Image (tube, rainbow, N blue to C red):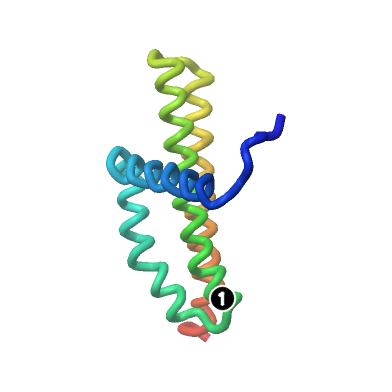
């Protein structure tokens, strides 16, 4: 059922505040997110600098954003699984492994995007 609360600047500000709280929690509690965050800070501006045109810049920088997004979702999955089932359960382990696999696939996507764009510039 859709929310009957009107959408306006106050609700947008609240949603932004909650999002920032989520980013802070990920930074504080998730070592993988911190590592990926450091790499993001290094490679995002690099992608904007070396990309030729808007499409290349979007692919190089956007692929990095997807990794951080997937890491946030993976961390959320892990947190809720640990809360719901603190003892080991095969399905809980599978859910956590699948979240991790999603992050891995997006990291492979980053390497593919960067490689396909940069390889011809330096080795052709």
Point 35% across, 55% down: residue = 37
Q: Quadrant of residue 58?
A: bottom right
Point 39% across, 73% down: residue = 45
Residue 6 is situated, as x and y percent measured from the top left of the image, at 63, 42
Residue 84 is situated, as x and y percent measured from the top left of the image, at 45, 17
20 lies left or right of 7: left
Residue 107 is situated, as x and y percent measured from the top left of the image, at 48, 54
Point 54% across, 83% down: residue = 52
Residue 4, placed above or below residue 43: above
The N terminus, quarter of image: top right
19 lies left or right of 37: right
The residue nearer to you, when weighing 52 against 97, is 52
Q: Is residue 104 visible?
A: no
Residue 29, placed above or below residue 103: above
Secondary structure under the numbered disc 1 in the rendered image: helix
Q: Extreme right residue here? A: 1
Q: Is residue 111 visible?
A: yes
Point 28% across, 42% down: residue = 28
**Residue hosting label 1:** 56
The residue nearer to you, when weighing 116 against 29, is 29
The residue nearer to you, when weighing 106 against 70, is 70
Residue 78, placed above or below residue 107: above
How many numbered marks appear? 1
Q: Residues within 10 Å of mark 1 (few under 14, many from 20)?
A: some
């Amino acid at each position: 059922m859709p929310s009957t609360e009107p959408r306006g600047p106050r609700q947008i500000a609240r949603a932004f505040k909650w999002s920032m709280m989520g980013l802070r929690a990920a930074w504080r509690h998730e070592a993988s997110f911190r590592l990926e965050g450091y790499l993001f800070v290094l490679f995002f501006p690099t992608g904007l600098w070396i990309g030729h045109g808007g499409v290349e810049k979007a692919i190089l920088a956007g692929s990095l954003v997807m990794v951080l997004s997937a890491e946030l979702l993976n961390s959320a999955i892990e947190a809720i699984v640990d809360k719901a089932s603190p003892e080991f359960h095969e399905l809980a382990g599978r859910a956590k492994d699948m979240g991790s696999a999603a992050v891995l696939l997006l990291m492979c996507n980053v390497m593919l995007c960067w490689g396909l764009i940069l390889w011809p510039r330096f080795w052709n």
